[in-house]
Amino acid sequence: FTVQKASISLTVVTSVKIFTDYWRVSKAGLQMDYTYDGKADTMDLDITPRFGYSNEQQDLQCGDGYSVCAPKTLSWSCYDQQFKKVNISDIAAGKATAVLHIPDFQFQPFRQGQPIRMSFGSNWDCEPLIPISIWTGVLISLGLAAIVWWALSMVGAVYSPSKFDDPKGPALMITQTE
């Protein structure tokens, strides 16, 4: 597999409907001329990342595997950025596809007419600071700890029967007969 020529196009939207202070890559494309087993061919792929957990505006997710987006003053950075075809159900067996892999990717759009900065702003990393697996473990542990605390407080609230424990009254006598 040899690539002769490749062209990457990114379309950036600087105002997302719900998150007006964010920018995001709304469309990404990869066009390339390649040779495979001595046969020359071209490929035109839509490698736009998934919008979020769903395609609803409120589900925008700026993270690895989802949208490339960040607050307007920040740059996007990712240790292992991959752009690939999202809908793989239409790729037939034996048909070629490609994945655009960019290690140490950093990207920040700028507005036309503004002076171009020669350095990136602070970065918005594609990996979350605290991943979902850690949050899940912490929340489940807190839930179980709350249940155990509640159970121990219920056991501690059980009083022994004190109906017959009057020291001024007559002693309780139980006769035994055979």
Image: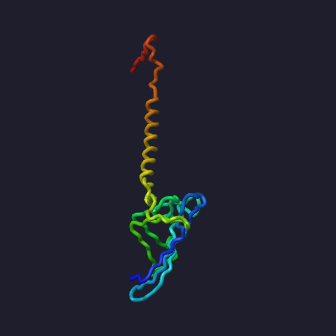
Q: Residue at point 47% right, 84% down? A: 42
Q: Residue at point 47% right, 61% down? A: 75
* Residue closer to the observer: 90 or 176: 90
- Whether 46 is drawn above or below 37: the answer is above
Quarter of image, res 13: bottom right
Q: Position of residue 115 (x, y in %)?
A: 51, 65
- Whether 158 is drawn above or below 87: the answer is above
Q: Is residue 162 left or right of residue 22?
A: left
Locate the C terminus and report the quarter of the image it occupies: top left
* Residue closer to the observer: 93 or 2: 2
* Residue closer to the observer: 41 or 163: 41
Q: Position of residue 90 (x, y in %)?
A: 52, 76
Residue closest to the far right? 17
The answer to whether residue 148 is visible is yes
The answer to whether residue 87 is visible is no
Q: Residue at point 46% right, 62% down? A: 76
Quarter of image, res 54: bottom right
Q: Residue at point 39% right, 66% down? A: 104
- Whether 78 is drawn above or below 164: the answer is below
Quarter of image, res 82: bottom left
* Residue closer to the observer: 135 or 28: 28
